[in-house]
Every structure is written in C-alpha cells, then in structure tokens.
Amino acid sequence: MKTRFVSIVFTAMHPVHNVLRGVFCYIKSMEDSIFTKIINGDIPCHKVYEDDRVFAFLDIHPIQPGHTLVVPKKQIDQFDELSEEDYEALFGAVKVIAQKQKAVLGKPRACVRVEGFDVPHAHVHVYPCNDAREFYGDPDRAQKEPDHDALAEVAQKLAL
C-alpha cells in the first residue's frame, strides 16, 4: 500500500477572519510487509502450510531446523489486534505445525514465540527443541548465509 493524500475542505466561515476554513490531511496506509510480499509471491520462501487465512514458511535464519513463521494473510501489526476468526486460524495452524514438527523432526517439544519486533505483521515463531538452551539458539545466526538446500529439505518434510 502507498501513502495517499486526501484533501478535505470545510465550507464553514472562520468566525473572526470571515474566510473559508480549509483542512488538508493525509491518510497513511501501511506499506506491504516483507511477509505480505512473501504471501503474494513477490519474495520466494520455503512454504510449509497455507489455508484461506494463514501462511507458514521456514525462517531463513532458524533458531533450530524447522523454525517456521506462521502469519495471518491479512496484514495486522500485532496479534492481539486480529479478528477472532484470524486469531483462531493463526493459532490453529500453529498447533498443526507444532505437531508435525515433533512427529517429523524427532524433538519432544515445539516452542512458540510471539515477539513482533522486526516486522509490522503479526506472526508466530514455531520450532522444535529439547531444552531451554535450544529455545534461544545461536545469537549470531542472522549474520550467516541461509542454507537454502537444508531449508528446502526441511520444508519438504514439514509440508502439510
């Protein structure tokens, strides 16, 4: 989406200066997030799940192999601002993906993180792990080049 400028003119007379008052304002719409661009196919991804309301793909800098980002198709900044239907669809997909991760990747737990710091589009991180150390992962992972071959292999295993 782009910023749109809208001019609104009120025809009321100014009470002191006897001139027409006018007000000009603008409406700023949200730019498409990187997630919206991924959902729209403008940016490639390793997709593992899609339905009418939700899209899920592998994080290119995973905390653990299988680290999946689950996002509503509708771009809303924070998860608690989602409609009830989109909220239920998002967390329903999170549950299905977590179950698949545990079954396919052999970890006893699936961890969930809802942060919302980097991208203004509600999203949930879901990834398998054994313990708290694995929950936090390598803090330098974002500086490393993504291993797209490994991501494609995991995406194929997790595809629903």
Image (cartoon, helix red, strand yellow):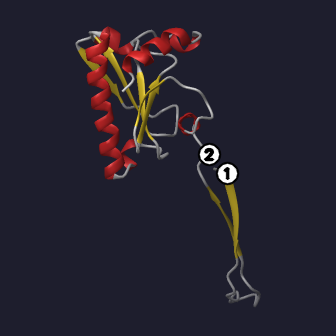
Which residue lies at the image location 59% right of the left edge and 10% below the top edge?
Answer: 145
Q: Is the residue marked by circle 1 packed among few (<14), some (14-19), or many (20+) residues within 10 Å?
A: few
Residue 15 lies, with reference to residue 63, above or below; the image says: below
Between 53 and 143, the one lying in front of the other is 53
Q: List x then y, in percent, for residue 22.
A: 72, 78
Residue 3 lies, with reference to residue 122, above or below; the image says: below
Between 119 and 54, the one lying in front of the other is 54
How many marks overall?
Answer: 2
Contact between labelled residues 1 and 2, with CB atoms less than 8 Å apart: yes
Residue 8 lies, with reference to residue 121, above or below; the image says: below
Which residue lies at the image location 38% right of the left edge and 15% below the top edge?
Answer: 157
| Amino acid marked by disc 2 | Glu
Q: Which residue is mark 1?
A: 2
Q: Which residue is mark 2?
A: 31
Residue 39 lies, with reference to residue 65, above or below; the image says: below
* Kind of element beneath mark 2: loop
Which residue lies at the image location 57% right of the left edge and 9% below the top edge?
Answer: 144
Mark found first going from the N terminus, 2 or 1: 1
Q: List x then y, in percent, for residue 124.
A: 39, 32
Between 31 and 99, the one lying in front of the other is 99
